């Protein structure tokens, strides 16, 4: 292996606080990047991953201050370089790719011009030579017919293509170091798989040194050579990916891995209770409050990063826990074998949905037939644009351009929700994808979660508070949140409130629209757990829409695969996975990243 | 909480939701708000108490010499009919304040109501209403008011009506924009899915979320209306003599600019005080509103 190109050591970064003090958010971070190697930086949101990655390039995040450390890029310390000189190095030697690819492309300029500008700025290349290099770049990131694409604007590309363009732009100046911040979050599974494959190829072909920030350990296992796990601003475990990822020594790494849904279907994803502290704790292990293995000594003093065998780990019990945390292939509790009453709750007959636009009517859901039994959990899988969300909206009475029928409890339902009976409305509840937009910011948690029950006449005036308290308890939130507004809650808490609202009427059918896709893996697992548990308790049937087959497999017995509004395949999830008949199902399954340590990994 | 992530290092305001108390607090804590409130209090005091403490009758001729400068008995001097300018300034603010406020209130209720309704129904009705607003916006305001006054004569009611008409499309456009952003949220879909009626949707789901921008816009529009009413009075189309009015006084006392400049500076200062105080309050409100919106930014 050749020498390191970027060597960051002892990096400590603090943010200014509203009260004038400073909170240390990254403490003594170090990383070494070598050409041809991908280093993964993993951890939950709020653990300082992005701050560490950006600061190691010498970038000063507003309101942040680098307290100590050095970051050598080919021998030059980026942390003590004037901005003028940094600008010459950024792009040319080290490139950064932010999470939102569309945001890093200028919407008002043609792609060719944007890449051309970078080439001109750093190499002075113009004219035909520039065009040639632009085309070579687009070709390299897997975009076909580059000649035509150069004159297009960013909005004329899909999300996956925009990500490829952003990568091409980052590579335009042939940097030696590429830092990526969650480059595939928010993309479809199949696109995600293509992009990470592309990135791996680019690292090998161009001998790039890559730092890959992500919370998705499953996805990382397909691309990373080394793994650094961060918690509360500190590196808590680092080493070769196959070793750290497959036999973690730190309880946090292990917990992160347990949160990843296993496409092999063996294991139920486990959430991590609580959330990371807001700054680096100095007098104890930061993870101790959330750790299953914590002992008294953990809370007495801070823990040093120690060299143990093949890695570095920050846990006083690392050696003794090694055996306990080893990831055994689990073959126990699959949810897929439950028996159902055979009592039909919902029936969709030839349900089609349309959207009217200038050109006429577009069919987005095409003659879907589906039967849901009482208490059953059915998954609907497909990429964006497959019509799966529209299907849910039509069931809920939110989509009016519909043909076919929705039969709920043997009664055909009117198309619009407002024409339906109170009991039908109370019987079907909906949880949305984005908890930030599904709760009214001007309503308290109390008002929000009791409203459906009030409307259905299920709670008397004055009884709301008791009901709300019970509901919050059932979604494991403290009743102190009752009088708060959604603005004071975290994403995971908001989604729990949305779930509490849905269960307030004790519904017979719960519609879940990508309810975890806006959340961290550790939160996702907890939310999935909560929904399945509540559904079982209440005997509620669930239609669970997701783009992620692994998530669906974790909680559903039966599933539908949709593409372009058509059901491509239907059956038990075990059947779909073991013997997919439709080529599209096979494609989706192939795209799922296998978590490290799973049978399929 | 999430102070550790790079995207999320802005100062977190305790998000305890929206309430009049919170508006008041943030307005009273900004310097624009404080100055605006102080100036507004002064001018409000003049308008409310002024007519009762005026040393002379504001309409009585010859209480002093004609067109004389400030003196001990006439602080702002007298006008060309020998009336006391101080008394006329103290008594001349009622209509300049009341007409804009009332007209603006009607315009916001009518324009905003129609606009929110249209957004809520969507589709064709939204297009029709927006188109109608756009056509109304193309009419030159002064010309429109002139035509109305020419047809109906000048009176307080006509003036209020004309200004209401003028502001309906303006208030409607602003509130439509605000409502449109709100309607796209899933909590509206959630309310529809549980079968809420239109009245609940508009009153409880949409209105509280656009109240902030609506209020800021209302304050700003009132300043325009004040200047508009003052302009009309100056042109002789507004409040008619001999009733005292700041706009009309500036016009009437123009000829005295050499002998008693205080006779026009007095009413001008009053108009400025009123307009600037409202403008500052509007600034403070809109800053609070945009701050509150930032505060609701996505934090994961």
Image (cartoon, rainbow, N blue to C red):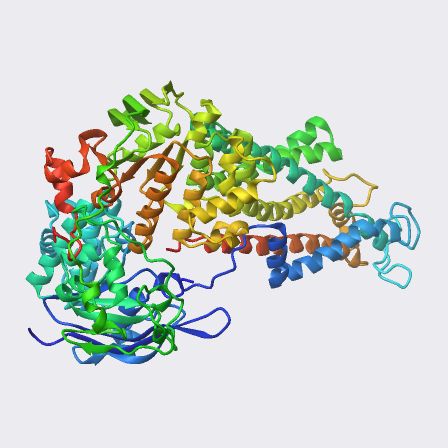
Seen from the viewer's position, the closer of residues B272 and A22 is A22
Residue A9 lies, in percent from the top left, at: 24, 78
Q: In which quarter of the image is residue B203?
A: top right
Instruction: Let me know if residue A151 appears in the view.
Output: no
Horizontally, residue A543 falls left or right of residue A430, namely left
Q: Is the residue A505 above or below the residue A317 in the image?
A: above
Residue B148 lies, in percent from the top left, at: 66, 30
Q: Is the residue A258 above or below the residue A210 in the image?
A: above
**Which residue appears at 56% of the width and 31% of the height?**
B199
**Which residue appears at 19% of the width and 38% of the height?**
A573
Seen from the viewer's position, the closer of residues B114 and A545 is A545
Horizontally, residue A575 falls left or right of residue B57, namely left
Horizontally, residue B77 falls left or right of residue A574, namely right
Residue A546 lies, in percent from the top left, at: 27, 41
Furthest-right residue in this view: B63
Instruction: Let me know if residue B201 appears in the view.
Output: yes
Horizontally, residue A176 falls left or right of residue B117, namely left
Q: In which quarter of the image is residue A581?
A: top left
């Amino acid at each position: 292996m050749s020498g390191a190109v970027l060597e960051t050591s002892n990096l400590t970064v603090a943010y200014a606080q509203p009260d004038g003090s400073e909170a240390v958010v990254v403490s003594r971070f170090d990383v070494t990047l070598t050409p041809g190697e991908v280093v993964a930086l993993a951890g939950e949101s709020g653990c300082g991953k992005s701050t560490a990655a950006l600061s190691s390039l010498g970038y000063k995040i507003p309101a942040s201050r680098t307290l100590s450390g050095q970051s050598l890029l080919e021998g030059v310390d980026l942390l003590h370089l004037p901005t003028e000189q940094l600008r010459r190095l950024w792009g040319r030697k080290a490139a950064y790719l932010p999470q939102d690819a569309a945001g890093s492309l200028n919407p008002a300029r043609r792609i060719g011009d944007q890449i051309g500008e970078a080439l001109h700025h750093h190499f002075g290349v113009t004219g035909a030579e520039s065009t040639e290099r632009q085309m070579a770049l687009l070709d390299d990131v897997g975009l076909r017919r580059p000649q035509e694409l150069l004159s297009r604007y960013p909005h004329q590309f899909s999300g996956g293509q925009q990500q490829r363009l952003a990568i091409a732009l980052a590579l335009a100046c042939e940097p030696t170091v590429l830092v990526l911040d969650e480059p595939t979050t928010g993309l479809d599974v199949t696109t995600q798989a293509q992009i990470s494959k592309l990135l791996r190829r680019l690292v090998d072909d161009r001998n790039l040194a890559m730092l890959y920030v992500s919370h998705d350990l499953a996805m990382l296992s397909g691309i990373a050579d080394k793994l650094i796990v961060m918690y509360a601003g500190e590196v808590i475990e680092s080493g070769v990916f196959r070793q750290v990822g497959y036999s973690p020594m730190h309880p946090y790494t292990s917990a992160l891995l347990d949160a990843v849904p296993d496409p092999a279907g063996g294991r139920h994803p486990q959430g991590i209770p609580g959330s990371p502290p807001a700054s680096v704790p100095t007098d104890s292990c930061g993870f101790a409050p959330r750790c299953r293995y914590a002992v008294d000594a953990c809370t007495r003093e801070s823990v040093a990063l120690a060299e143990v065998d093949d890695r570095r780990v920050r846990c006083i019990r690392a050696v003794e826990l090694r055996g306990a945390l080893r990831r055994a292939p689990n073959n126990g509790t699959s949810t897929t074998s439950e028996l159902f009453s055979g009592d039909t709750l919902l029936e969709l007959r030839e349900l089609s949905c349309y959207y009217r636009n200038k050109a006429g009517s577009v069919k987005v859901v095409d003659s879907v037939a589906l039967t849901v039994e009482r208490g059953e959990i059915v998954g609907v899988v497909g990429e964006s644009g497959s019509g799966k969300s529209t299907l849910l909206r039509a069931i809920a009475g939110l989509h009016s351009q519909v043909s076919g029928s929705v039969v709920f409890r043997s009664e055909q339902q009117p198309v619009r929700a407002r024409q339906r009976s109170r009991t039908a409305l109370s019987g079907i509840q909906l949880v949305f994808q984005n908890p930030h937009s599904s709760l009214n910011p001007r309503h308290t948690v109390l008002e929000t979660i009791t409203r459906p029950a009030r409307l259905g006449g299920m709670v008397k005036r004055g009884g709301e508070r008791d009901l709300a308290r019970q509901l919050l308890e059932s979604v494991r939130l403290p009743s102190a949140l009752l009088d708060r507004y959604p603005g004071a809650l975290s994403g995971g808490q908001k989604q729990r409130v949305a779930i509490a609202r849905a269960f307030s009427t004790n519904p017979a059918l719960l519609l879940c629209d990508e309810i975890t896709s806006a959340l961290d893996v550790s939160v996702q697992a907890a939310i999935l757990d909560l929904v399945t548990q509540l559904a079982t308790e209440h005997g509620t049937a669930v239609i669970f829409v997701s783009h992620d087959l692994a998530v669906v497999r974790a909680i559903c017995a039966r599933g539908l695969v949709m593409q372009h509004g058509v059901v491509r395949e239907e059956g038990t999830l075990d059947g779909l996975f073991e013997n997919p008949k439709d080529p599209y199902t096979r494609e989706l399954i192939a795209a799922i990243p296998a978590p490290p340590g799973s049978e399929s990994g | 909480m999430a102070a550790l992530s790079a995207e999320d290092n802005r100062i977190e305001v305790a998000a305890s939701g929206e309430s009049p108390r919170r508006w008041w607090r943030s307005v009273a804590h900004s310097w624009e708000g404080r100055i605006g409130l102080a100036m507004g209090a002064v001018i409000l005091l003049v308008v409310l108490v002024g007519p009762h403490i005026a040393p002379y009758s504001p309409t009585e001729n010859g209480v002093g010499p004609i067109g004389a400068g400030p003196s001990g008995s006439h602080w702002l001097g007298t006008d060309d009919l020998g009336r006391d300018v101080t008394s006329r300034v103290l008594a001349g603010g009622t209509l300049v304040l009341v007409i804009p406020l009332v007209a603006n209130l009607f315009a916001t209720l009518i324009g905003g109501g129609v606009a929110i309704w249209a957004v809520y129904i969507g589709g064709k009705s939204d297009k029709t209403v927006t188109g109608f607003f756009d056509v109304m916006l193309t009419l030159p305001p002064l010309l429109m008011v002139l035509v109305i006054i020419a047809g109906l004569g000048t009176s307080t009611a006509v003036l209020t009506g004309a200004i209401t008409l003028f502001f309906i499309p303006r208030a409607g456009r602003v509130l439509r924009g605000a409502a449109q952003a709100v309607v796209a949220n899933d909590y509206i879909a959630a309310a529809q899915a549980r079968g809420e009626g239109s009245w609940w949707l508009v009153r409880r789901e949409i209105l509280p979320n656009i109240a902030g921008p609506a209020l800021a816009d209302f304050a700003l529009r009132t300043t325009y209306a004040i200047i508009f009413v003052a302009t009309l009075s100056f042109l002789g189309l507004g409040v008619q003599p001999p009733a005292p009015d700041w706009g009309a006084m500036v016009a009437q006392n123009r000829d005295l600019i050499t002998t008693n400049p205080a006779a026009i500076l007095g009413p001008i200062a009053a108009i400025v005080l009123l307009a600037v105080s409202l403008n500052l309050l509007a600034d403070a409100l809109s800053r609070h509103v945009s701050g509150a919106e930032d505060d609701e930014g996505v934090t994961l």
